[in-house]
Image: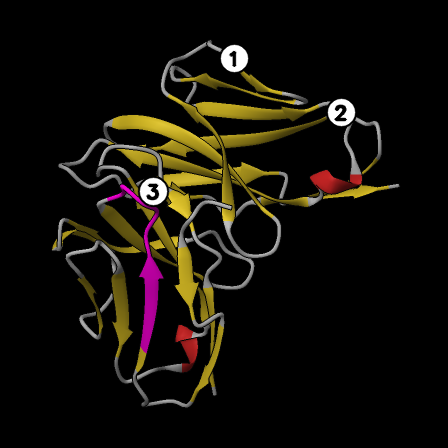
């Protein structure tokens, strides 16, 4: 059965700290891995990763995928209170024409001033 | 803002009732997916519609059904509501069934 596991489940840091969020997965016929940020309701898209070892960056956020070890990390440097959210990792299996996403339970990040 | 809208924002129903949730996809997107997110959990895939046809379904019973209209907006219908149906229902649209999905703000359903 396809599975996505995120760790830690929750994390409390202070502004300015650097955090690393982990996502491991088991999926038949991997297509891509995606990271989303969920603050109140709508998950907002951060990154899509399809190739191993290629870092994607957006400001203070970066992410990388290891398809051999079946995991991805999301790094946030110089954290700010606005980074407080649930970070969701999702995997998209290559299965027919449906791009359904399989999500982990998320990591709740709280950034204290 | 992703351009994906959902209505209503909140809804309270009682067990056994039926509910219809609505989603307007982002302009130019012909694929709509629905997810259920229970409290403290990640979203679970319900089904996907592509050009008005169901294009894949997750592990949900038949009382969860949907529609997609010619303008690519979509409805999720749930019959015979159960307490465990209480959740945030998210709609996501994508330009095709093979591209990144963008989520709407969701509808929070409470079943009493």
Q: Quadrant of residue A13?
A: top right
Q: Which percent across, then down, holds residue B58?
A: 24, 55
Q: Quadrant of residue B27?
A: top left
- Tell which circle, 3 or 1, labels the residue nearer the N-terminal end: 1
Is B99 on the left-hand or right-hand side of A82?
left
Q: Which percent across, then down, holds residue B66?
A: 21, 66
Q: Which percent across, then down, holds residue A108?
A: 65, 46
Q: Residue furthest right?
A: A113
State the CA–CA distance, disc 2 to disc 1.
Answer: 17 Å
Q: Which percent across, then down, holds residue B42?
A: 47, 51
Instruction: Evaluate if marks 2 and 3 touch, with contact meaning CB atoms under 8 Å apart.
Output: no
State the CA–CA distance, disc 2 to disc 3.
Answer: 28 Å
Q: Give the residue at mark 2.
A: A18
Image height of B27 relative to B41, above or below: above
Label 3: few (<14), some or many (≥20) within 10 Å?
many
Instruction: Evaluate if marks 2 and 1 touch, with contact meaning CB atoms under 8 Å apart.
Output: no
Label 1: few (<14), some or many (≥20) within 10 Å?
few
Which residues are the magenta region? B20-29
Both on one chain, marks 2 and 3? Answer: yes
Q: Give the residue at mark 3.
A: A101
State the CA–CA distance, disc 3 to disc 1.
Answer: 21 Å
Q: Which chain carries label 3?
A: A
Q: Mark 2 lies on which chain?
A: A
Image height of A36 relative to B15, above or below: above
Disc 1 on helix, strand or loop?
A: loop
Q: Give the residue at mark 1.
A: A55
- Tell which circle, 2 or 1, labels the residue nearer the N-terminal end: 2
Instruction: Evaluate if marks 3 and 1 touch, with contact meaning CB atoms under 8 Å apart.
Output: no
In the depicted view, which residue is nearer to us: A42 or B5? Answer: B5
Disc 3 on helix, strand or loop?
A: loop
Image height of A55 relative to B85, above or below: above
């Amino acid at each position: 059965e396809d599975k996505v596991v995120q760790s830690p489940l929750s994390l409390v840091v202070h502004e300015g700290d650097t955090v690393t969020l982990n996502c491991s997965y088991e999926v038949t016929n991997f297509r891509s891995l995606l990271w989303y940020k969920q603050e109140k309701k709508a998950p907002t898209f951060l990154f899509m990763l399809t190739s191993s070892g290629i870092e994607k960056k957006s400001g203070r956020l970066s992410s990388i995928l290891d398809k051999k070890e079946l995991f991805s990390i999301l790094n946030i440097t110089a954290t700010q209170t606005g980074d407080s959210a649930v970070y969701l990792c999702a995997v998209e299996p290559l299965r027919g024409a449906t791009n359904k996403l399989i999500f982990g339970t998320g990591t709740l990040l709280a950034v204290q001033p | 803002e992703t351009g994906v809208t959902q209505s209503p924002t909140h809804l309270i129903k009682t067990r056994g009732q039926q509910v219809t949730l609505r989603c307007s996809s982002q302009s130019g997107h012909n694929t709509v997916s629905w997810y259920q997110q229970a409290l403290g959990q990640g979203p679970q895939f319900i089904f996907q519609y592509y050009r008005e046809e169901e294009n894949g379904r997750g592990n949900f019973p038949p009382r969860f059904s949907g529609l997609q209209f010619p303008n690519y907006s979509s409805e999720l219908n749930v019959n015979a509501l159960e307490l465990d149906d209480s959740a945030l229902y998210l709609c996501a649209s994508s330009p095709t069934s093979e591209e990144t999905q963008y989520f709407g703000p969701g509808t929070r359903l409470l079943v009493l």
